[in-house]
Amino acid sequence: MSPTQSSVPAATSEGRVAGPRGQTWYRVTGDLAVSRERGLTPLVILHGGPGVPHDYLLRMARIAETGRAVVHYDQLGCGRSTHLPEADAGTWSVELFLEELDRLLAALRIEDDHLVLGQSWGGMLAAEHAIRRPPGLRGVVLANSPASVPLWSHGVDRLRQALPAGVQAVLDRHEAAGTTSSAEYKEAETAFYDRHVLRMTPYPAEVTSSFALLEEDPTVYHTMWGPNEFSAEGSLSGWSVVDRLDRIGAPVLVLRGEHDEATAECVTPLVDGIAGARLRVFAESSHMPHIEEEAAFRAVVEEFLADCDARPQRPAAVTSR
């Protein structure tokens, strides 16, 4: 049985990092200094959305039970970090979140020695971070993340067409009418979520918390992604790293669920385009194998992180942004 939210280790410390657009909230599980002294590179978790707070990833804090410090944070615009609901669309960019990550790493003094795990949009951000070849990056986990949003959208369209005809009709009708906030639409949307986002009911408390916080302030999600999971119409609609993956020099682990909304067609380019990338597919999972197959997920990730620790750290030139 998967652990409940109450079994997630308590934060060892919490804090905020100031930047030009506001403050970024973070929590650390474990001791950063002790972790590094033991040769265990700290792990930074990048959440999805954009704009879905870190709560749904809290089970990954259990990686700290191995002695490795784990950092969660809420990206600007959501959760416990500064919200900017009045910001214009141009505020929300990949560069904004890369700069935020750089500030966090510097404030925690781990910019010269860190691992990152990005889930969904967080994996897109992690790939962008890795493409710049920061010298302190020891390894990257790309979980349930696409190499290209157009490829993601194509795969999601195919999954949607496999839904019951009645569900598809409800989705189509409300999208045409612009009434996607209606209860009927939300119920139909849940049919997709139950197949391809989280195959577990009821949702665990930490997932419900993240979704509730997203509902309270969907600014970033609506601006960068779109009005719903099916419509990638925001500023990320054309995003792709397919032609830049050869710049990644750090070890990479790619993860997805067999029933994932991040379909094989949008994930496979990561494996094909990154030298030495490893792939693991979780047969009983969709978009959240860290919950659906928690023990297996954590074992795979912990093994990869240990391998990264064992590799000699080699400096790398930072590419232009």
Image: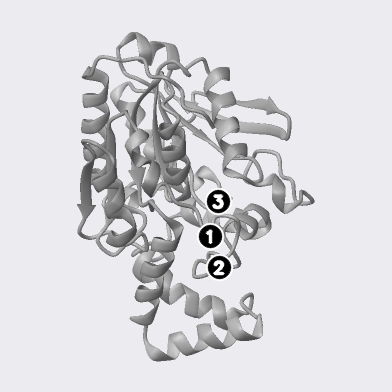
Q: Residues within 10 Å of mark 2 (few under 14, many from 20)?
A: some
Disc 1 and disc 2 in contact, CB within 8 angstroms: no
Q: Residue at x 57, y 43 (%)?
A: 94
> What is the distance, in whole Å, between disc 2 and disc 3 at their CAs?
12 Å
Amino acid type at image mark 1: Ser
201 shown above or below 238: below
Q: Which circle marks residue 50 in the picture?
A: 3
> What is the distance, in whole Å, between disc 3 and disc 1 at their CAs?
12 Å
Q: Residue furthest right?
A: 86
Q: Nearer the viewer, mark 1 or mark 2?
A: 1
Of label 3 and label 1, which has the lower sequence position?
A: 3
65 shown above or below 149: above
Q: Residues within 10 Å of mark 1 (few under 14, many from 20)?
A: some
Secondary structure beneath label 3: loop
Q: Residue at x 32, y 21 (%)?
A: 67
Secondary structure beneath label 2: loop
Q: Nearer the viewer, mark 3 or mark 1?
A: 1
Secondary structure beneath label 1: loop
Disc 3 and disc 1 in contact, CB within 8 angstroms: no
Amino acid type at image mark 3: Pro
